Image: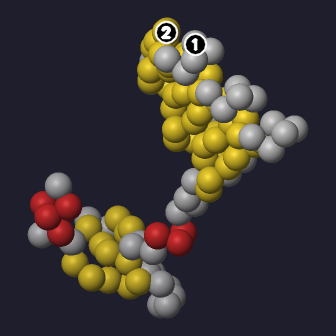
Amino acid sequence: MKEFFDAFWIPGRVPGGGADQGLWHDSIMTTENAASKPEPEPFEKLHKDGSPWARGFMLEGEMQGDWEWFRVDGTRMRSGAMDRGRQVGIWITYDKSGVPYKETDMGR
């Protein structure tokens, strides 16, 4: 898909003569500066004994991407995906030995 769009985009400058470079197509400008988009940051919360309790990613203060929750003994308890703090997709619940026993579809 990128190759298709690359064929139609031409280099241009941001209106007003700014230093930021961008690409123009039918008067729409997009920058290629990845630093301007926030990236999810790794997050981990620990039990009192220091073992992992939850592990995932945060984006602008909300849970984002794949998440896992663990019991104190280290076995996985639940896993699934978050989209800006909302559960999405298939969530798996694990029994006390860490074996999947239930799947729940949270939708999109």
Kindly identify the amino acid type of the residue bearing the numbered disc 1.
Answer: Asp
From the viewer's perspective, tell me whether residue 36 is left or right of residue 33: right
Q: Closer to the camera, 105 or 51?
A: 51
Crowd class of label 1 (few under 14; some 14 to 19; many from 20; radius 10 Å): few
Q: Are marks 2 and 1 in contact (CB under 8 Å)?
A: yes
Residue 49, visible in the rendered structure: yes
How many numbered marks, from 0 up? 2
Q: Which mark is residue 14?
A: none
Q: Report how far apart the C-alphas of labels 2 and 1 lie in the structure.
A: 6 Å
Q: Up-down: is 87 above or below 18?
A: above
Q: Quadrant of the C terminus?
A: top left
Secondary element type, mark 2: strand
Kindly identify the amino acid type of the residue bearing the numbered disc 2.
Answer: Tyr
Residue at 14% from the left image edge and 64% from the top image edge = 3
In the image as oriented, which residue stretches furthest toward the right?
48
Secondary element type, mark 1: loop
Residue at 73% from the left image edge and 35% from the top image edge = 53
From the viewer's perspective, tell me whether residue 66 is left or right of residue 11: right
Disc 1: which residue: 95
Position in image of residue 61 (x %, y %): 72, 47
Sequence-earlier tag: 2 or 1: 1
Tell me where residue 5 sits by quadrant: bottom left
Position in image of residue 19 (x %, y %): 49, 90
Residue at 44% from the left image edge and 20% from the top image edge = 90
Tell me where residue 56 sits by quadrant: top right
Crowd class of label 2 (few under 14; some 14 to 19; many from 20; radius 10 Å): few
Q: Which mark is residue 101?
A: 2
Q: Closer to the camera, 2 or 19?
A: 2
Residue 86, visible in the rendered structure: no
Q: Up-down: is 15 above or below 92?
A: below
